[in-house]
Structure formats: C-alpha cells, structure tokens
Image (cartoon, grey):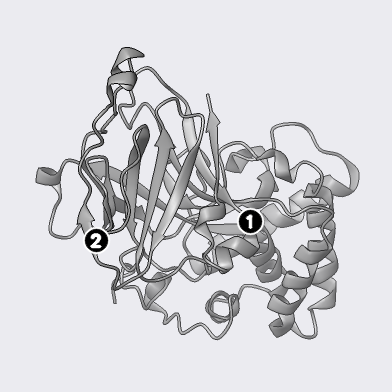
Amino acid sequence: MDNWTSTVGPSGDPVGQTSRSSAFRAFARRHGVSDDAITRLLWSMEPAVYFDWKTPGSVRPDDRVIGYIGGAPELPLDMEWDMGGVFVASFDLAAVPRTLFDDGLPREGHLLLFTWSDAGGGKALYIPPGTETAVAPVPVPSELDLRFGSSHMVLERRTMVASRDDAWDAHAWLIGEEYGGIWDEVEDEEAEWQARLEAAVEEYAAKVGVRPAMNNSTDKLRGVQRNVHDSWDYVTEAFQRLREEAVLALRDDPERFDEVYDRAWRELPEQPLLHLATFNMESLQYGWMDGDISWLISRDDLHARRFDKVEHHWLG
C-alpha cells in the first residue's frame, strides 16, 4: 500500500488508532523498538506535514494536493473577506496525510489561515464539512483607505503538495544541534535527558529503517515553530523531567501513556502553545516583508477545534 493512503502509516501499516499513541507504539514494537524509546519519542515529538508549492499547471497526477495558497478564499455564505485580511492558505484536512503520530487535527473540513497586511496579526478559520461556501470577492478599499494609501493584498494562487510523510519535530527544541535543535551547550541532568532522546531517535531509525525528516525551518502544518515560542520558556525543564519520570512509570504498563501524558500537561506550570502552521514570507512573495509567519494554538483548543483561539506570530 502507498504511504500516502490516509488509512495507513509508514510501510503500509494500518493506523486504526484506538488512542492517540496506540498506532505508533504498535508499529514501533513490531520493528523491535524498545518501549523506553517509544515513550520518549511519543512524549517529545510532534507530527509534521511538509509541503511544496506549485503553479496549478505543474501539478502532476501523483502529487498529493492538500490545499492552495493565495488567490481568493472560499468562505461560508454569511461571512465576508475583511479589508486588510490577507488570505494565506486553505488546507483540505481530508487530504492531509495521516501518520502514526496523532496530530490532533480534524480529518475533514477545511482550515483557512489569514494574516494582516503588515503581518502584525492573523487568524485561523475552521470550516466544517457540509458548510455551504462560495469564493469571496476581493474587498474594495474605501475612499478613506485609498486616501491613506491602503489597498488589499492578494497573494499569487498556487497549489500545496505534501512532500514528506515521515516527518517529526521536537517539542521546544528538546533535541540536539545535529537535528536542528538546541544550540547552546547543555550540562548535567539536561544533557543526559537530551542524549537519551537522541538515542531513541537513532534506535527508531535503525530498527524501522526510516529516518524521519526533522526540519524546523520548512513550510509545514503542525510540527513545531522554527524558533521555540516564549510560552515554552518556563516549562521545558519540567516537560523533560516529566518525560523521564513517565519512562520509568510506564515500563510495566506502557498502554497507560495517554493517561500519563494528559496528566503531565495539566501539571506544567504554564500551558505552552503548540504549532499549527508556518509559511515563509519570501516564498509567499509577500513583497516588502520577510521572515516567517506562524499560527499557534493551545493543546486544549486544538483538541476542541477552537481555531478562533489561534495566536499569530511573525518572526522577522
């Protein structure tokens, strides 16, 4: 079976998830990966879907199309395209590859992303399946807008094509420089934790025969942000410590992972934000802006599909 089929994972293994972690653990166990390594990976990694952009005429029959960027968005009939709201992308969530790591995203409907003309803010919109939509007309600037030099930016329409199905990123840069993570030298207990996580990645790659891509700078859906968000500043050490405690606690009962992981998130001193999507502004042909724009969301809001709570972040 093809890796891109939404009901299978790497090597054609059925997903069939009964919990957020069961499919990955079952797959890794069948390949001889230890439960300790599996727990560290499940705890530390976020699934990521990397994508490339193509002009509509260059899309091939075997490309996995997951949406489009630019042009005009399809919006619910009772919604208008706000003046100054730059439409960035629309993801067809039913077409987004599903991997063995649960990404927390709905598997149907569409996710639309917007930024402002100065990239100083943005929003996300989830459109459930069955919602009647229409292509929105481009907003027309008012006389006052024109007087102040305002216009409405429309990005070039292109197609998003998924480029990699085996891709992870590490929570809060909890992995070393070799993988594009922590740059500063770490010591003592933290160095031991990092080394164990890196060993888990190497064990997985050796046993499974696939080394998942880990690229914090790419355009992607989910994964982690290119630079760790401030919301992780005061929880990284606690998150790692809870992981090491979980490895010991779950050795005799690894199927309790989801329960232990959920409780650990509640015990963190703050709730760090998860990464939803990133786009490179130069690749978007945004004009005078550069850097990356990202959309971030809390874990609870992601699972509850409260995409109206998404936070926008520009890294110049």
Q: Is 125 drawn above or below residue 95 in the view shown?
A: above
SS at mark 2? strand
For this view, does 262 lie left or right of residue 99? right
Could you tell me the amino acid type at mark 1?
Ser
| Mark 1, residue position | 298
Image location of residue 277, percent across then percent down: 47, 48
Pointer 2 and pointer 1: residues touching (CB < 8 Å)? no
Please tell me in which quadrant of the rendered image residue 191 appears: top right
Q: Is 290 drawn above or below residue 274 in the view shown?
A: above
Q: Is 202 drawn above or below residue 279 in the view shown?
A: below
Residue at 35%, 36% in the rendered image: 86
Could you tell me the amino acid type at mark 2?
Thr
Please tell me in which quadrant of the rendered image residue 204 appears: bottom right
Number of the label disc, if any, that sits on residue 133: 2
For this view, does 222 lie left or right of residue 58? right
Residue at 29%, 73% in the rendered image: 130
Locate the N terminus by quadrant: bottom left
Residue placed furthest toward the front:
143
Number of the label disc, if any, that sits on residue 142: none
